[in-house]
Amino acid sequence: MLRRSVLTLPALILPVAARAQDLGSAARPVRVGVTQGVHAQTFEKVREVLAREGFATRGIEFGDFIQPNAALAAGDLDANAYQHLPFLEAQRASRGYDFVPIGRTVLTLMGVFSRRHRSLDALPAGARIAIPNDPTNGGRALLLLAEAGAFRLRPGVDHRATVADIAENPKRIRIVELEAASIVRALDDVDAAAITGNFAVPAGLNPLRDALARETERSVYTVLVVVRRRDAQAPWARRLAEGYAHPEVRAFVQETFGGAVMPGA
């Protein structure tokens, strides 16, 4: 479901001609799609920093992982900032999007959480573990669970792993695939769940403090600023990417999320 942010946009202080050069054919804010929570919060800080430089942006929030790319392809967005490279590659392959990354935003650590058990070793036979149902984050969760000893995957698999790649499962763990945004709400109904930081942190779950297992830093999962290929060299695209790399934005991420989300720019 799409939820449009209600933002008060500062008036641009640049001349109209300069605005047109920076923002494209129309002198309007750059429209950036983000998912709710961490990415929306981070973007708001970027918007604030860029506004002081006379560069206007507008955030549009989404409640799932599919619509921000669909909106970018349709021209309803100029950029989005919510997906890592494996997800982008899967979307380009399956949907034919001609998108490219132009910058980095944050790395949201994935953790395995439980309200019933204190460790993965304590999981009973037949335990149910929820993971994201999108191919890349699902594979990411399976890798994390395998590394933590919940089961073994067949040799050589990567972030594209599926449930079919589980080779040894002595506890007969059952994998429940759910939409990523809904897994936090399902945590009481399963034995454990793999949740990315952008959904865990708003729910009061910190991967550094609360997770039974968590990722270490992996640049392949750093979230990207993504645009249509034809816009990759546009001045406004460069300025948007620079906003995410701004020291004030990096400091905001470090201070706000307590290490559960890391600056990626």
Image (tube, grey):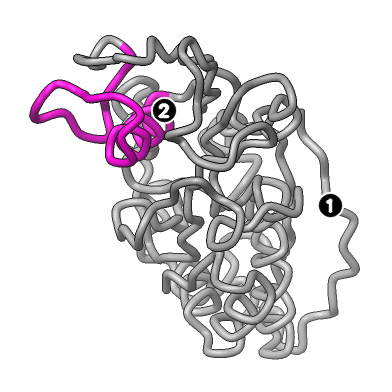
Observer able to see residue 61: yes
Q: Quadrant of the C terminus?
A: bottom left
Q: Which residues are magenta?
A: 135-163
Q: Residue at 70% x, 86% y: name it.
A: 54
Quarter residue 158 falls in: top left
Q: Residues within 10 Å of mark 1 (few under 14, many from 20)?
A: few
Q: Position of residue 160 (x, y in %)?
A: 27, 28
Q: In the rendered image, which residue does mark 2 sit on?
A: 138
Residue 171 or residue 193, whichever sits in front: 171
Picture mark count: 2
Q: CA distance from mark 1 to mark 2?
A: 29 Å
Left or right: residue 16 versus residue 121 is right
SS label for mark 2:
helix
Q: In the rendered image, which residue does mark 1 sit on?
A: 5
Q: Quadrant of the N terminus?
A: top right
Specify the farthest residue to the left.
Answer: 156
Q: Residues within 10 Å of mark 2 (few under 14, many from 20)?
A: many
